[in-house]
Amino acid sequence: MKDIIVIASGKGGTGKSTVAVGLGTALSAQGCRVLLIDCDSGMRGLDIMLGITQNLVFDIADAVSGSCTVENTVYPCPDKPGLFLMPAPLNAYDEVAPQILGQLVHGVEDIFDYVIIDSPAGVGSGFEAAAYPARRALAVINTEPTSIRGGQTVSAKLRACGIDDIRLVINRFNKNTFRKMALYKDLDEIIDITALQLIGIIPEDYSLAAYIQSGKSGKLNSPAMKALCNIAQRVEGQSVPLMIR
């Protein structure tokens, strides 16, 4: 396995799950085998975004209870070869403990190149479980003060969980809106506030959001998806430019 990455945000509405799905799609398009794990118990949504809801029988809680094997909870994405999903439980009270999720990830680490864990927004118990097996993290923010503060909070919590390799993703960036709001001098100021190394800037792109919410995973030729492909290449250790549109 190359890496286990948790995607986190301090508050909801940053587009964190879209980033998780888009990154998984981009890495699988590069020939990697990628497992997405939905850790948002009671609020799962990656199955909808990947268009496989009708195929689901088992989830993480079923594997933990012994109702099925771990392999039974891993579902391929039909239109994305190399991309797979382990869905979260539908009921919040079936939330998986951190050590248990670590054991589940350990059980599949020889099968996949990447495991991408979509953490619930915030820093509650679901976040702690999502962070537990991870080796590195992407903190997703927007350019509003509340989102930036959330990024600071979640990065501090990630470090408390033992994750020091944390990279910043600025999502839903609109250059004109950013300038008109004039809350910050430039993006460098935001990067300095978060004290995180930037790995990518994803432009505001309603077409990608609509495409993923309809269960089609991601259009590789959309502006946001191109930025996500750049992030995937940087995750792979390649030197590619940041994309700002």
Image (cartoon, rainbow, N blue to C red):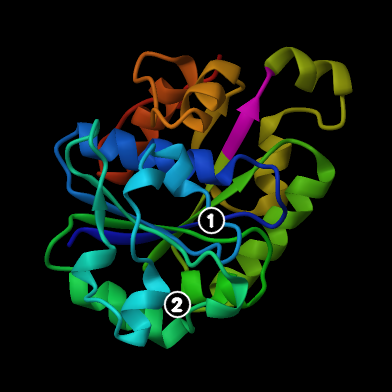
Q: Residue at x 29, y 85 (%)?
A: 66
Nearer to me, 190 or 57: 57
Predominant SS along the magenta part: strand
- Res 233 quadrant in image: top left
Label 2, label 1: how far apart the Cα atoms are: 19 Å
Q: Is residue 171 left or right of residue 192?
A: left
Magenta-highlighted residues: 170-174
- Please, what is the three-letter code of the amino acid marked with disc 2? Tyr
Q: Is residue 81 left or right of residue 214?
A: left
Q: Position of residue 36 (x, y in %)?
A: 35, 54
Name which of mark 2 and mark 1 comes first in the sequence.
1
- Res 15 quadrant in image: top right
Say which quadrant the N terminus sits in. Answer: bottom left
Q: Is residue 12 left or right of residue 166?
A: right
Nearer to me, 52 or 86: 52
Question: Which tag is nearer the camera, tag 2 or tag 1?
Answer: 1
| Residue ID for mark 2 | 132
| Residue ID for mark 1 | 44
Residue density around tag 2, few if under 14, some if 14–19, many if 20 or more, within 10 Å? some
In the rendered structure, does residue 31 fall within the stretch colored magenta?
Answer: no
Q: Residue at x 32, y 36 (%)?
A: 25
Is residue 239 depicted above or below 65 in this figure?
Answer: above
Disc 1 is placed on an element classified as: loop
Disc 2 is placed on an element classified as: loop
Q: Position of residue 103 (x, y in %)?
A: 30, 83
Q: Position of residue 218 (x, y in %)?
A: 39, 27
Residue 119 shows up from this direction: yes
Q: Position of residue 102 (x, y in %)?
A: 35, 80
Q: Residue at x 65, y 63 (%)?
A: 154
- Please, what is the three-letter code of the amino acid marked with disc 1? Arg
Nearer to me, 204 or 217: 217
Is residue 59 depicted above or below 48 in this figure?
Answer: below
